Amino acid sequence: MTAARPAAAPARNVSDLPTIPLGSPLLLLGRGADADAERGVICAGDLPAPDDPTLVDRARRAKEILGDRVMILGHHYQRNQVIEFADARGDSFELSRQASIAEAPYIVFCGVHFMAESASILGREDQTVILPDLAAGCSMADMAEGHQVVDAWARLERAGVAAQTIPLTYMNSTAAIKSFCGERGGAICTSSNAAAAMRWAFDQAPGGWAPGGDPDGGKILFLPDQHLGRNTAVLGLGLELDDCVVYDPWQPDGGLTDRQIRDARVILWKGHCSVHARFQPAMIDKIRAERPEVEVLVHPECRHEVVLQADRVGSTGQIIRWVEEAPAGATIAIATELNLVKRLGQEHPDKEIVFLDDTVCFCATMNRIDLPHLVWVLEALIEGEVVNEVKVDADTRRWARVALERMLALPGDDRSLVAAHASA
Ligand code: 13P
Ligand code: SF4
């Protein structure tokens, strides 16, 4: 017998529906700026047409003319047409290191906005950082706004734990949040040094590393990627899943009771990467069923369930090294951004490189940087015009730089998070 269906609720007018409290006004990309977030940055100018057949020659010529005056940095997620012109390519950590030692007066950053900001913070005052398309933001960085982080800290103060908490932010965050962390004794991390950064943070925290869940022990507020934070805390440091709680900036009190905050060791921000969070454990099951010999490499921005099933977990730089080290004939499935995975396939024709799932797409904002934008900013420089400069103001820069320098001083760790867990 089928249960009677409940009577349908009476239809309501849209105006009767509860209003969703949106903390931030919506800004169209390219219209107006929001100093507190990565959204709404301006992109103006006459770009060369994408089908202009002279673009490659124009880029070569512009680089030749500019010579040592310009250094082009390219993140691994950039398109081939752009990465081809990079003087240095790398993951977030490597590119921030390159920016800190670059001699050239102009740094053209082919990546996203928070990376260009970090180059501006780490570079010399007289250097100019250019992002070829200012609308190349990061949806994860947008999930934490400066005022929300200030509110979260006030929440920790109300719960009585702020004094024993070190704020740690992933590189993928605004300069204002980096500065916030630096000023409160915290630091930055990238996906290649998150475990070292967390260990460092527990060492700094009053109360320190307190195994056994001592509520007076040190705590970390980890921004803005909950997945990197959770994966690192559990697999890199050996904490329990229950040691982590998720702070939701859109909920009253962050959606947490005082008790939950006091009992936690790591307070994770409710943010994620819209590209990496799409990978699912079922995709790993499927590829293993089809290709039992496959080795699965995933980025730590992936969900915990995905990371647990992987053979190795690491930053883009680490994934590239593992592919290089794999023997000819190896089958490798990779869960990270598609531009990089496709390029690895092209660069290693002797290995079978498989993208973990076809429904996961490029990082839309990384992809905004294309050859027309690159040619446009380089040719403008030849004309003596700086377009699309990213400059962090002196006040923000001061503490953000301290936080970034703390990160650069951390010991590197080339191990996979999964392998580190297994050998701990
Ligand atoms: P890494 O460069 O640290 O691997 O991070 C990946 C990423 O999402 C950059 O936006
Ligand atoms: Fe941001 Fe994810 Fe794109 Fe990286 S891949 S820039 S974290 S949206």
Image (spheres, rainbow, N blue to C red):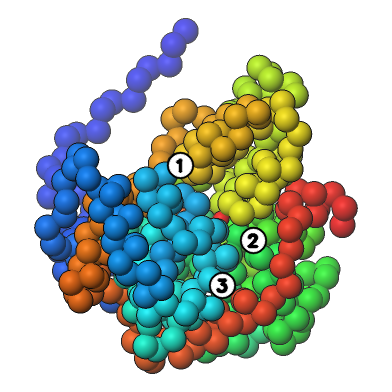
Residue 388's disc is: none
Residue 346 point in image, percent of width and height: 53, 34
The three-letter code of the residue at mark 2 reads Ser
Look at the image and tell me whether residue 263 can be seen. no
Q: Residue furthest right?
A: 423
For marks 1 and 2 on the same chain, the one whose residue lies earlier in the sequence:
2
> Residue visible at 69% across and 24% down?
288
For marks 2 and 3 on the same chain, the one whose residue lies earlier in the sequence:
3
> Residue visible at 79% across and 76% down?
209
Q: How many marks?
A: 3
For marks 3 and 1 on the same chain, the one whose residue lies earlier in the sequence:
3
The mark closer to the camera, 1 or 2, is 1
The three-letter code of the residue at mark 3 reads Arg
Residue designated by label 2: 192
Which one is in front, 19 or 129? Answer: 129
The residues bearing labels 1 and 2 have C-alpha atoms spaced at a distance of 19 Å
Q: Secondary structure at mark 3?
A: helix
In the figure, is residue 277 to the left or right of 29? right
Query: Does the residue at mark 1 contact the one at mark 2 (Cβ under 8 Å)?
Result: no
Residue 180 point in image, percent of width and height: 47, 83
- Pointer 1: residues within 10 angstroms few (<14), some, or many (20+)? some
Which one is in front, 283 or 401? Answer: 401
Which one is in front, 383 or 236? Answer: 383
Placement of the C terminus among the 4 image quadrants: bottom right
- Pointer 2: residues within 10 angstroms few (<14), some, or many (20+)? many
Residue designated by label 1: 339
Residue designated by label 3: 97
In the figure, is residue 267 to the left or right of 122? right
